Image (spheres, coloured by chain):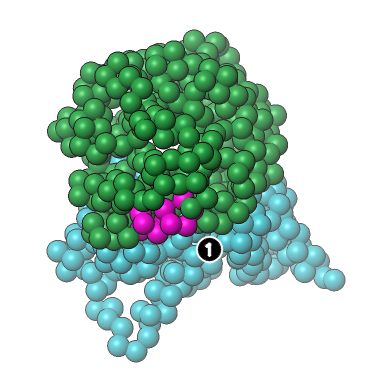
Amino acid sequence: MTGLERMHRAIRFQPTDRVPVAPLLGAHAVALAGITYEATSADPTAQAHALLRAVELYRPDAIFTLMDLSAEPEALGAELMASVNRSRIVARHLSPEALLTGDLESVILAARVPVFVETVRLLRAALDDTVMVGALVSGPLTAAANALGIETIARMLRRQRETLSDILERLTKACITVASAHLEAGAHGVMVLEPCATSGILGPYDLSSLLLARLQAVAKHIRDQNGIAILHICGDCQASLPGLADSGFDVLSLDAPVGLVRAREVVGRRIALMGNLDVRQLLPRGGPESVYNATVALIADPGRAGGFILSGGCELPADTPTCNVLQMVEASALSSPRA
Amino acid sequence: MSDRSTLTAALEAAVEAGDEAGAASAASRLLEIGAAPTIVTGALSRAMGRLGEQFHRLDIFVPDLLIAADAFEAAMTVLEPALNASPRRPKGTIVIGVVEGDIHTLGKNLVRVMLAADGFEVHDLGRDVKVAMFVDAAIERRADIIAMSSLMTTTMDRMGDVIGLLTSRGLRERVRVLVGGAPVTRAYADEIGADEYGEDASEAVAAANRLMTMWQGPGADRS
């Protein structure tokens, strides 16, 4: 069974020889390859090289491009700055008006977005159908939050809902455009990143009234192109799980604060689950034994019912020890066949 | 019900509804009828305290807290001349900021308002604050607490650097450290040697109060 087959079967709740493993290795892979973040976010060959080395080392069932939530805002016109260590962040946000005018669907494919699309093309050429090649795309709310600033979005949620709704509608189409570009380049699936849809920021009412239909449109588009549709939410989103279960995605990727046993009870078999080893403490700072034990526990409980993909709760930090990633993969390999 | 209690209730309701104009108006009217500034700050503190509890229970969400904070600040702007004329003794002095490399200010701003509502004197250093700036500001302001926020795993290690600098400058026993932010956990706070951790804005206020209580207890070292 190839990694891609394992992923496909898992999301359909079909038996697999073991639980598939799909950690977001981007930042870690780049560090491991000794390539700077700047180089990998600007050079698809460098990024693909780093990710392929990680595939060789860890043998995951899926590999995703580097997580960079500033790519879409930059394409939309936001000004970036270099953060300490590695990543770029938005230094100067746009005005809401900037997102209400112009053709976002063509603008969104500018700046560094093509770097990630080309990285997908290189990964697919190298891996064919052995391993799932996944692209990461900012969801409409997260693209809006990073382009305009989360405080602006939070105030708009209460004071300018109509305007925000218009912006989200336009960014939904832009998100679909980026997802399509990745799928056309050979991605087997797309992970839509919506860290801002965490419960603290977006309550169940706001989710259902402003975002859910847009997420469903994105998911439908990905699935209509035979792509695996994955939705990732950071932080604690337990209050929103009933809505997220109806998002139309194949997989819901959850962060460590969400208990997956409880999540499975809420979402039933409407959506497969992915996650959610702690990437803040356990994977970067825990010992291999701790990682192994946590992985075994995760597979034993949420993984028991199938429809489960083992991963971290978010992208693995760059300095995650190699032995910890290997423990995670090995623990999964020892798992028994899944019903 | 007296004018004062009616206006106090209106002020609390305006803050809880995120009504900036209503909060400013009620605060202004209270001062006009001769209410002491502490009556106004008391009402603001009660409203923000209730909101903090609701937020902690996920009965309300960040947008609700944020517009309430806006209303709180609108009332405080009205109140500021009266407060300056009769300064009150704060619970403690805090310098607060988002660590170097990180510009996500939402959580920090909410904590800043909640701390101010609870009676702390808060000096906001803003975002992307360099390690030395936290320590220099703590010295300059004679701060009891440095409060730091980070939203990114790539920047949260700067919190430990601030603690390291406090130690190397011989200030660790004089300045307590409170940390928070999405990727920060209690275990991480312990690992870097922070004194307290706030999971959310209301928890951060409770943590700051704990720090001040500990500090003022028997054997506390404030030399």
Q: Is residue A277 left or right of residue B163?
A: right
The 10 Å Cα crowd at callout 1, few under 14, some 14 to 19, many 20 or more, is: many
Query: Residue, x 46% and y 73% (percent of image)?
Result: B209
For label 1, the residue is: B202
Residue B148 at x, y percent in the picture: 36, 56
Front residue of B200/B78: it is B200
Query: Residue, x 25% and y 23% (percent of image)?
Result: A48
Q: Residue furthest bottom?
A: B218
Locate the N terminus of chain A and report the quarter of the image it occupies. Answer: top left
Q: Where B18 sits versus A9, above or below? A: below
Residue A127 at x, y percent in the picture: 29, 22
Query: Residue, x 33% and y 69% (percent of image)?
Result: B195
Helix, strand or loop at label 1? It is helix
Subunit bearing disc 1: B
Rendered green, the chain in question is A
Query: Residue, x 39% and y 42% (percent of image)?
Result: A17
Q: Is residue A180 magenta?
A: no
Residue B202 at x, y percent in the picture: 53, 63
Q: Is residue B90 left or right of residue A133?
A: right
Rendered cyan, the chain in question is B
Q: Main secondary structure of the magenta part?
A: helix
Q: Where A24 sits versus B65, above or below? A: above
Q: Is residue A118 left or right of residue A9?
A: left
In the rendered structure, which segment of residues is drawn in magenta?
Answer: A294-303
Judge whether residue A125 can be spotted in this image: yes
Q: Amino acid at mark 1?
A: Ser
Front residue of A197/A218: it is A218
Residue B158 at x, y percent in the picture: 26, 51
